[in-house]
């Protein structure tokens, strides 16, 4: 199997991950209406009013639930209601949707509602959690719908204990057959099943795990096998597939589609640009990964491979640079942030930092960059329900201010920002003094 280029088709403003053998994965809340609108079953007004939920608010939750499942669910009923307080942003898109812009959260008072319905075409019951108030409408809280069984599956996949697992985001996906739908909103093809795309933090590293609606893992794609020696060289196929899976997740962001011109083809191209054997010294010698500043470093020579994966769109070309050590396991690779962060993204980041701080870009230095996955709010709004609705690839960057702090001799200021993959959304996380290591 010789596979060197993969193209992901985009539907609407969202990226569909096109599997060569299994299915299309689409963000659940963004796919157009599939088939005829289902008629929600009647529910006794007394039932939810006994729970303390006003009729108008109950109708808001039901309409939002129906919309989020593309009008394909039946027999909607409210299972549980309780008074709640929380903080969230105001939706800034039509139909109560959220964009990726930074926002100030405001306190809310209202109800936490658990609602359930039937998805008749796949014989599946769905039960979801919403927060709703009289003023701002209903907002799904997907993190609360990650069950203990799902956590157990994720922990097993990542080989950690459930107690050492943090779930950061959990957008739902609908998995369609590989057959494409016709143009327009009507699509007679029912989904194969509902699924989850989970962003989890384990052992200080973020991971994306895909699960079926019932919690079992979804098999990942396979790009290479051991017969692809012409492309892989001495790199094992399992390691190449692990890198491609990670690159696919990072390029799978609607922000790349939004960056294209209105008349541009809505395709995300992804290809292996190069695979090279390399050797490097841990103190920074050779053509290896970027090395952090440290006082002492081991004089050790390592060898492995440098894999460059290119992707993005014509207006925003991107490259991801991976390093894999000889003898590494399937997940033991390094995505070099400093070598992967595009010049265009760096300029945007430094320009935003300069605007925030009042320091010219000439006085700022990009000190370090880590490739990361974030929630919709770039991990800057803990406990906000809508932040867990989406996963965004990006960078955790450290900016060094080349100015000494008054009253000190050598201290400098280190700013930490989270940014999306293109550097168009930059948010301050922390700042403090920095001193070089001994």
Image (cartoon, rainbow, N blue to C red):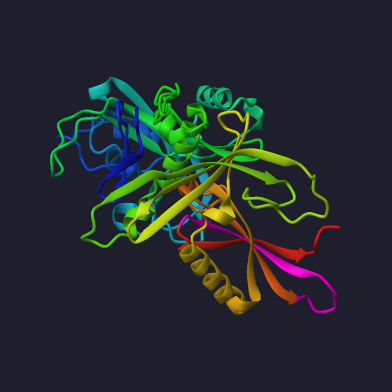
**x, y percent for residue 317:** 39, 57
**Quadrant of image for the N terminus:** top left
In which quarter of the view is residue 224 placed?
A: top left
**Quadrant of image for the C terminus:** bottom right
The stretch drawn in magenta includes residue 413: yes
151 to 88, vertically: above or below: above
- Foreground residue among 382 and 357: 357
Instruction: Say which residue appears at 47% left-offset and 28% top-offset.
Output: 237
Instruction: Say which residue appears at 41% left-offset and 33% top-offset.
Output: 230
- Foreground residue among 312 and 129: 312
Instruction: Say which residue appears at 48% left-offset and 63% top-offset.
Output: 345
Classify residue 310 as left or right of residue 206. Answer: left
Q: Is residue 81 visible?
A: no
Q: How many marks?
A: 0
The stretch drawn in magenta includes residue 435: no
315 to 173, vertically: above or below: below
Q: Is residue 401 visible?
A: yes
145 to 350, vertically: above or below: above
Instruction: Say which residue appears at 57% left-offset and 32% top-offset.
Output: 331
In which quarter of the view is residue 255 placed?
A: bottom left
**x, y percent for residue 66:** 28, 38
**x, y percent for residue 337:** 57, 52
Magenta span: 404-421
Classify residue 137 as left or right of residue 189. Answer: right
**x, y percent for residue 319:** 46, 52
- Foreground residue among 229 and 361: 229
111 to 35, vertically: above or below: below
């Amino acid at each position: 199997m010789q596979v060197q280029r993969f193209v992901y088709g985009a539907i609407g403003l969202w990226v569909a991950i096109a599997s060569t053998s299994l299915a299309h994965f689409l963000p659940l809340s963004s796919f157009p209406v599939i088939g005829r609108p289902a008629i929600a079953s009647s529910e006794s007004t007394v039932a939810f009013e006994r729970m303390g939920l006003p009729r108008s608010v109950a109708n808001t939750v039901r309409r939002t639930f129906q919309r989020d499942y593309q009008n394909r669910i039946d027999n909607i009923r409210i299972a549980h209601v309780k008074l709640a307080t929380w903080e969230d942003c105001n939706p800034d898109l039509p139909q109560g949707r959220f964009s990726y812009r930074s926002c100030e959260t405001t306190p809310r008072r209202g109800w936490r509602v658990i609602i359930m319905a039937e998805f008749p075409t796949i014989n599946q019951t769905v039960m979801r959690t919403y927060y709703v108030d009289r003023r701002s409408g209903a907002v799904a809280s997907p993190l609360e719908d990650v069950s203990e069984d799902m956590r157990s599956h994720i922990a097993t996949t990542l080989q950690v204990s459930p107690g050492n697992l943090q779930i950061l985001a959990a957008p739902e996906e609908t998995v369609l057959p590989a057959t494409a739908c016709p143009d327009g909103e009507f699509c007679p093809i029912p989904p194969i099943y509902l699924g989850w795309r989970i962003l989890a933090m384990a052992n200080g590293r973020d991971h994306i795990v895909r699960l079926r609606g019932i919690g079992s893992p979804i098999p990942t794609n396979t790009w290479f096998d051991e017969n692809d020696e012409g492309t892989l060289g001495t790199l094992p196929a399992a390691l190449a597939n692990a890198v491609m899976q990670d690159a696919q997740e990072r390029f799978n962001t609607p922000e790349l589609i939004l960056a294209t011109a209105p008349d541009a083809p809505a395709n995300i191209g992804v290809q292996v640009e190069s695979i090279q054997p390399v050797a490097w010294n841990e103190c920074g010698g050779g053509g290896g990964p970027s090395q952090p500043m440290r006082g002492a470093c081991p004089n050790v020579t390592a060898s492995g491979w440098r894999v460059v994966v290119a992707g993005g769109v014509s207006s925003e070309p991107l490259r991801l640079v991976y390093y894999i050590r000889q003898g590494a396991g399937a997940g033991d690779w390094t995505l070099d942030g400093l070598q992967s962060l595009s010049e265009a993204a760096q300029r945007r980041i430094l320009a935003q930092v300069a605007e925030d701080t009042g320091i010219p870009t000439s006085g700022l230095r990009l000190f370090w960059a880590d490739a990361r996955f974030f929630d919709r709010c770039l991990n800057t709004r803990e406990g906000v329900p809508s932040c867990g609705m989406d996963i965004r690839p990006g960078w955790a960057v450290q900016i060094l201010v080349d100015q000494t702090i008054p009253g000190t001799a050598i201290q400098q200021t280190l700013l930490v920002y989270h940014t999306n993959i293109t550097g168009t959304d930059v948010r301050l996380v922390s700042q403090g003094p920095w001193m070089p290591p001994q």
